[in-house]
Every structure is written in C-alpha cells, then in structure tokens.
Image (cartoon, grey):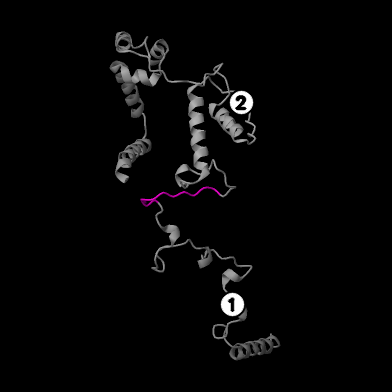
Amino acid sequence: MSTTLPIRRSIGRAASNCLSTRPSRSLHPSPSSLIPLYHHPHHPSTQQRRHEATARRLTKKHRVPAAPAFANTTQPQDHIIYNPPSSAPNVYHTPLKFLPKSDRRRELLLAQQRAAQAAAAAYKPSSPFSTASPAASALASLSASAGTEAAPTPRLPPPVRAPYEKKYHLTPPQLDEMRKLRARDPRKWTRVKLAEKFECSQFFVSLVCQAPQIKAERDAELENIKKRWGRQKTMAREDRVKRKESWGRDA
C-alpha cells in the first residue's frame, strides 16, 4: 500500500503538468476541423446549394429590357411576309403575286392554271377508285407543249373509301317529308336511316329536322352521369366551361 501511493501521486503530477502546458483546442483548431462538412468525404452534406450556372433564367433579375426571345411575335402586321424554305428555285414554288409583270413565268403559270381548270371541268373518272389526277394530266400536257420532259407521275395507292361528292339534289317537298318521318317515329327514322333514304349526310339531316324528345332523354342520361361525378371532376368540367367562354374574349 505504501509503494502504490507515490506512484499514483507522480502520475497525477505528470497529468496536471501536461494539461497546464498543452494549448486549448478551442483557441487553436486543427486544419481538419476548418474543412466544411460538405467537402469532407466522410461527412456528406444534407443541404443542396444551387449556383448561378444551374439556376433558371429570370427576366426581371437585373431589371434590363426584355430580350427579343421573350417578345410577342404575334403582332398584327399590314404587309405580306413570304419566307419560302431554303431549296432550289422552282417556278412552281414562286407565287404569281411576287413575279414582275414582264416575267415569262407569269404566262406559264396562267396557262397552267387554265389547263388545270379545263381538265378538272372535263374530268370523268372511269371508276370510283380511279387514281388519275386532272392536275397531273394538265401539267403533263403543259410540259409537252413547252418541249420539256414531264416528270413521271408517282403511282398513288388506292383510296381507302370511294371519293365522296356533295349533292344538292333535295327539293322542298323532300325536306318536308324528311321532317314528317322524323317527327312521326324518331326512334325508327334516325339520322342514319334518313341519310341513307335521301342520300345526304347525317349533318344535313340534323340541320333540317330535330327530335326534341330524344334530346331530352339524352340530357337526362347525362345529368344522371354527372350526379356520380366527384368533387374534383366536377370542378375540372366547370373550369373547362369557363375557358371555352373566355376563348372569344382573348382576341
């Protein structure tokens, strides 16, 4: 017991001397402690920093006049702007309005237009699926008369459906008959049936006659569907109606 006391006292004195002579950590920080945590490989940063190079472009940041890229390009103009695509010059690509009166191409274009109109007026296809074009034949005849070789007309694929031509053949008595049939039995004489009977379009049938009772039933079905809508869908449809009403006021 007597030998351990001097040893403990000597160890305590040495420790006190070391603590008294060693400088404080708070007064002299080590170089490693000065490095920020977000640069230390073992201490990843939890805070993100955005610099100027990755920031979004702001138009009002420096209070300078707006760049031309932000200017409105849909301003009304009182002149004609003709900006054709960059390609080889072609007489058929230049409008007649931009050619001088002494230009030879004006006569060629006028002759081409007259020939195309005459060919279109006298054109009678042999079959409803004919792929011959009157404009192409007129262009070929014009090129042959000018002494130039006409380009071969590409063979077009057959049309998906037969060419449809509008007919203006219905008379007032036929329109009255259409209204009577529609009013007598709207479920039997639908738009499709009337269009097939009178050889016209369904849109024309809707212009001539209507079925109020059928429309009322469709409106009632739509109201029942709207009752099952949720709050979000109802608000979205109301906003759509408001946007449609504001379309005419934006101009």
Please name the residue shown 31% across and 40% down the image.
Answer: 242
Q: Residue furthest right?
A: 3
Above or below residue 110? Residue 54 is below
Q: In which quarter of the image is residue 130?
A: top right
Give the amino acid type for the residue marked by disc 1 in the picture: Ser
| Relative depth, front residue between 154 and 228 | 154
Q: Residues within 10 Å of mark 2 (few under 14, many from 20)?
A: few
**Residue tagged 1:** 33
Mark drawn on residue 11: none
| Relative depth, front residue between 1 and 147 | 147
Give the amino acid type for the residue marked by disc 2 in the picture: Pro
**Residue tagged 2:** 157
Counting from the top left corner in percent of width and height, residue 197 is at: 40, 10
Please name the residue shown 42% across and 12% down the image.
Answer: 196
Please name the residue shown 63% across and 87% down the image.
Answer: 15
Element type where label 1 sits in the image: helix
Left or right: 242 as drawn, with respect to 70: left
**Quadrant showing the N terminus:** bottom right
Q: What stretch is highlighted in magenta?
A: 74-85
Q: How crowded is mark 1: few (under 14 residues within 10 Å), some or many (20 or more)?
A: few
